[in-house]
Amino acid sequence: MIDVHYWPTPNGWKVTIMLEECGLDYNIIPVDIGGGDQFKPEFLAISPNNRMPAIVDTDPTGGGDPITIFESGAILEYLAEKTGKFMPSNPRDRFKVLQWLHWQMANLGPMMGNANHFKNYGKNLTSDPKQLEYGTKRFVGEVDRLSGVMDAQLAANEYLAGSEYSIADIITWPWAMLIGRLIDEASWETYPNLKRWVDQVRERPAVEKGFRIGRDLGERELTEEEEKSRRELLFNQTNEKVRHAREEAAKLAKA
Ligand SMILES: N[C@@H](CCC(=O)N[C@@H](CS)C(=O)NCC(=O)O)C(=O)O
């Protein structure tokens, strides 16, 4: 059985979509990132960067003790290896997939996260619009550039890594499908091949199902007080603030 430490966000959906695609059994363990679950010592012992998703496989590849994995890219590689699905076995094609998987992790995910921060969250964090201008321009600009990179790749290929659907598509789709919402819906006209692929991947039943897992978890209307503490928690993280939780996690790991 696989325990998935999860909250319904693009990085979480990558894992539920992959599990649905592979037909693996799993348990959802909610990590309410607005409520601070990511700082609980028992979670930090699994995911030391205080970010979800993370998994614990109690029946791991190769046998032995349960295996814990954080970082969605590593999780998808592990599940692909465990099931022999969505990653080719020959090195030439495998590395085509892996280069796009790492591209998503290092480029599209972080740039979209930062673009969203400056463009949307920022206005609740500062009353000075000037502070947001440069960051918005820089990161929305990068998202536009990266959308062009995908569009060109998808003009020449059905899927991101070539002719086969793979973990490169599974890891990229949950972010890429939000590009219209982040830039503006009209921007899809600039990336017609990307739009074709977003719609095509969405038609897969496992994608639709994985994307809906735990939808209700994030839907509760928050009070103003809860919103304020959520902002404080998510956007004021320093070494000093998480030190205590990390020390508790280290004690737990030793016990
Ligand atoms: N590179 C990580 C990113 C994970 C990540 O940023 N998760 C966010 C939610 S989408 C999170 O857990 N945030 C909690 C926090 O900011 O404290 C991955 O792909 O697994």
Image (spheres, grey):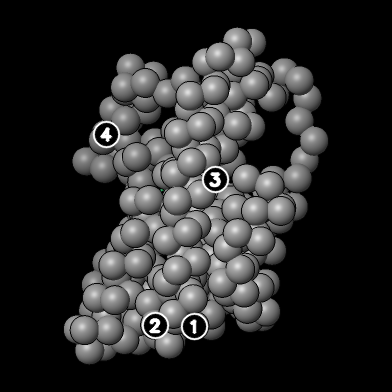
Residue 219: % across, % down: 75, 45
Q: Earlier in the sequence, mark 2 or mark 3?
A: 3
Residue at 34% x, 40% y is 49
* Mark closest to the chain's N terminus, 1 or 3: 3
Q: Secondary structure at mark 4?
A: helix
- Looking at the image, tell me whether mark 2 or mark 4 is earlier in sequence order: 2
On-image quarter of the C terminus: top left
Q: Which mark is residue 251?
A: 4
Q: Secondary structure at mark 2?
A: loop
Please give the label number shown on residue 158: 1
Residue type at mark 2: give it: Gly
Say which of 99 and 21 sits in front: 99
Q: Is residue 114 left or right of residue 67?
A: right
Say whether residue 58 is left or right of residue 211: left
Q: Position of residue 212 (x, y in %)?
A: 69, 63
- Mark 1 is on which residue type? Glu
Frontmost of labels 2 and 4 is: 2
Residue carrying label 3: 31
Q: Is mark 3 within 8 Å of ligand 1?
A: yes
Question: How many numbered marks, from 0 up?
Answer: 4
Task: Give the CA distance from mark 2 to mark 4.
Answer: 46 Å
On residue 162, which mark appears? 2
